[in-house]
């Protein structure tokens, strides 16, 4: 039987942020991020609403109607990247750019907002989902015993 504690989060870590390792084995880096706070959810909704309005303005008569929860996937990806960059990402460590220089948090946020780096957006969203979860740490500790 499942325990409720497996689905709870540490609210202070969700609000203040935590450093989470992301990326494929052998090619990882760290994102310091808040969890999915109310500010993130509200920003994501506002961005989706704005995108839907913009798409609907360009529609021809008789065409389908876009709603905030039914956007084209690439448009929704951009909205998620913008929301995670604006409300969650606090830092990045261990990620080098094409010039072999560390990527700054401002550059990382710009990459997420651009929509040109969907893999980074996915990793940032995964990191935010892990913030405040003690389950992974508890599993590692149990495996060591």
Image: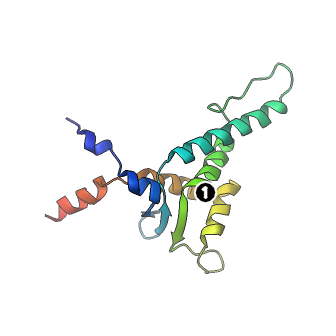
The answer to whether 50 is drawn above or below residue 34 in the figure is above
The reply to whether residue 131 is in sight is: no
Q: Residue at x 61, y 80 (%)?
A: 100
**Measured from the top left, where is residue 59 in percent x and y?**
83, 29
The answer to whether 144 is drawn above or below residue 34 in the figure is below
**Measured from the top left, where is residue 84 in percent x and y?**
58, 53
Q: How many marks?
A: 1
Q: Residue at x 64, y 42 (%)?
A: 76
**Measured from the top left, where is residue 16 in percent x and y?**
45, 59
Indicate left or right for 59 with 30 as reference.
right
Indicate left or right for 35 with 55 as reference.
left
Considering every residue shown, the one lying at the far left of the view is 145
**Measured from the top left, where is residue 34 in percent x and y?**
48, 56
Mark 1 surroundings: few (<14), some (14-19) or many (≥20) residues within 10 A: many
Q: Say which quarter of the image contains residue 87.
A: bottom right
Determine which residue is flagged by label 1.
85
90 or 118: nearer the viewer = 90
**Label 1's element?**
helix
The answer to whether 1 is drawn above or below residue 128 in the figure is above
The reply to whether residue 122 is in sight is: yes
Which scheme is used to colour this image of the protein? rainbow
Q: Residue at x 47, y 53 (%)?
A: 128
Indicate left or right for 128 with 105 as reference.
left
């Amino acid at each position: 039987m499942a325990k409720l504690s497996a689905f709870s989060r540490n609210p202070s870590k969700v609000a203040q942020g935590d450093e989470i390792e992301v990326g494929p084995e052998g090619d990882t880096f760290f994102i310091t991020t808040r969890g999915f706070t109310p500010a993130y959810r509200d920003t994501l909704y506002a961005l989706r609403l704005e995108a839907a309005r913009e798409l609907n303005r360009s529609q021809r008569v008789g065409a389908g109607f876009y709603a905030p929860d039914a956007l084209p996937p690439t448009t929704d990806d951009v909205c998620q990247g913008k929301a995670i960059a604006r409300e969650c990402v606090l830092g990045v460590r261990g990620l080098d750019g094409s010039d072999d220089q560390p990527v700054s948090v401002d550059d990382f946020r710009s990459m997420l907002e651009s929509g040109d780096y969907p893999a980074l957006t996915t990793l940032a969203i995964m990191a935010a989902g892990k913030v405040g979860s003690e389950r992974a740490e508890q599993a590692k500790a149990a495996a060591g015993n």
